[in-house]
Amino acid sequence: MAENDRIETDSLIDWIIAEGLSDNGIDDILERLVERLLALGFSLIRASIAMPSIDPLQRGFAVAWFRDTALSTEVQGHGEAGREMFERSPIFYLLSNRLLHGRWRLPEPTGVASFPLFDELAALGATDYVMKLVPFPGETALEGVGISFAVDAAGGFTAEQLAAVDRFTPALALVCCRIAAMRVAIDTLAVYTGARTSGRILSGETRRGGGDAIYAAILFADLKNFTSLNEAWAPAKIVSWLNESFEAIVSPVENHGGEVLKFMGDSVLAIFPVETGDPADACRRALQAAKTAMRTTEETNRNRAERGEPAIHIDIALHVGEVFYGNVGASRRLDFTAIGSAVNEATRIETLADTVQHNVLASAAFVAQTPHGFQPVGTFSLKGVTKPADVFAWVG
């Protein structure tokens, strides 16, 4: 590599590292990297960065730049279609053959096994394609990154360009590893604790006992007679039904601005914090979530009936009040959750559903904020609560 080429590559490496310390977007870094490579004389027609993912909805993703189109993100799902897409890719070929780099001249000779990507690139006029795989440390399922470039110059990549790619790829991979690790921390924590809670944890709220007293609408849902199903059905089927029922509850909660704090066996605890100073707004959102959850559960049960499977109904209790929202637990094992008398009262109200023959119940405090559609069903003594509670049922 000529001295001038080395200086330019060193400058590019310095830029990559600086960007990697200040930017959390792989797509932004790729787009600006392409601009610099074009300025250095690379006749790029495509560039991409592909990585596996720790995500319940996708197995991996690739950020791709094409010369004549906008930057795009391609996602591979966990299903059969995602696996088939992966197995028809250059990355799969390299991994299957225990290779860390590959180069293909395009178009490939007739009779040689190809990949759909290469056919697409050849149609665009690409002449040369290189891919580098860089492994990551083995602490997580993020095994590494695939970095690729395609050019349409008549002679393909020059020797100097290939040498430059070899030199700056480790720096780019290090940046991708740093960004991916941060994304894993954010996304995985959000999956297990909820978006609002994960944000507070990542901002440093990790001390036991740390938290705030907040005012919130509370939704507590419980699956009816679910425990008895364990005696008659296989565990795999039970888990499948449990997930279906939880999805019917959780999606409406999140869509209406609530956050699920925990799953307790076959029960769900969610809150709708009062963020605008208006408790009625939080209660309206909690009620809408409850109504949607009931409708979705009915639809799910109809589908189960068609498959010859048992229906699983839910009971929901709605309440509003002050809760402690923060860290509870042991010194090295914490749970970021909501506790307090209001939470306890909500769980006790739910146990009255069979007694009053209604599936959605609410406290007097909740109904005071959103009264339409409720009717009183009685005054009850709640376990652990001194004052008897007036309870209302949603009748629409």
Image (cartoon, grey):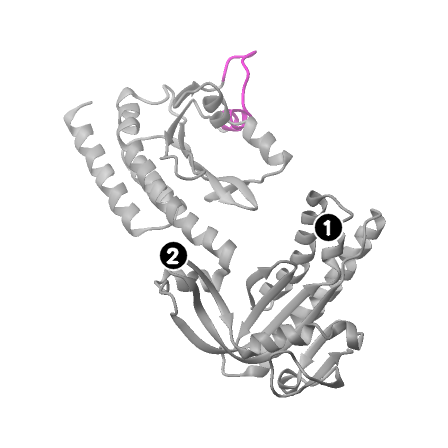
Kindly identify the amino acid type of the residue bearing the numbered disc 1. Answer: Asn
Say which residue appears at 48% left-offset and 41% top-offset. Answer: 53
Residue toward you, 342 or 203: 342
Residue sitting at the far left: 3
Q: Over which residues does the magenta segment extend?
A: 108-123
Is 109 inside the magenta-drawn segment?
yes
Left/right of residue 198 with respect to residue 365 in the rendered view: left
Q: Position of residue 279 (x, y in %)?
A: 56, 82
> From what the image shows, is residue 7 above or below residue 389?
above
Kindly identify the amino acid type of the residue bearing the numbered disc 2. Answer: Arg
Say which residue appears at 67% left-offset and 76% top-offset. Answer: 349
Label 1 and label 2: CA atoms lie apart by 33 Å
- The dot on residue 332 is 2
Task: Classify the position of the N terminus by image quarter.
Answer: top left
Q: Position of residue 240 (x, y in %)?
A: 69, 48
Q: Is residue 69 visible?
A: no
Task: Classify the position of the C terminus by image quarter.
Answer: bottom right
Q: Position of residue 102 (x, y in %)?
A: 41, 21
Which residue is denoted by mark 1 in the rendering? 230
Q: Which badge, 1 or 2, is on the more N-terminal residue?
A: 1
Left/right of residue 319 with respect to residue 169 in the rendered view: right
Q: Position of residue 26 (x, y in %)?
A: 39, 45
Q: Residues within 10 Å of mark 2 (few under 14, many from 20)?
A: few
Q: Is residue 141 visible?
A: yes
- Describe the element under mark 2 as helix, strand or loop: loop
Residue toward you, 162 or 77: 77
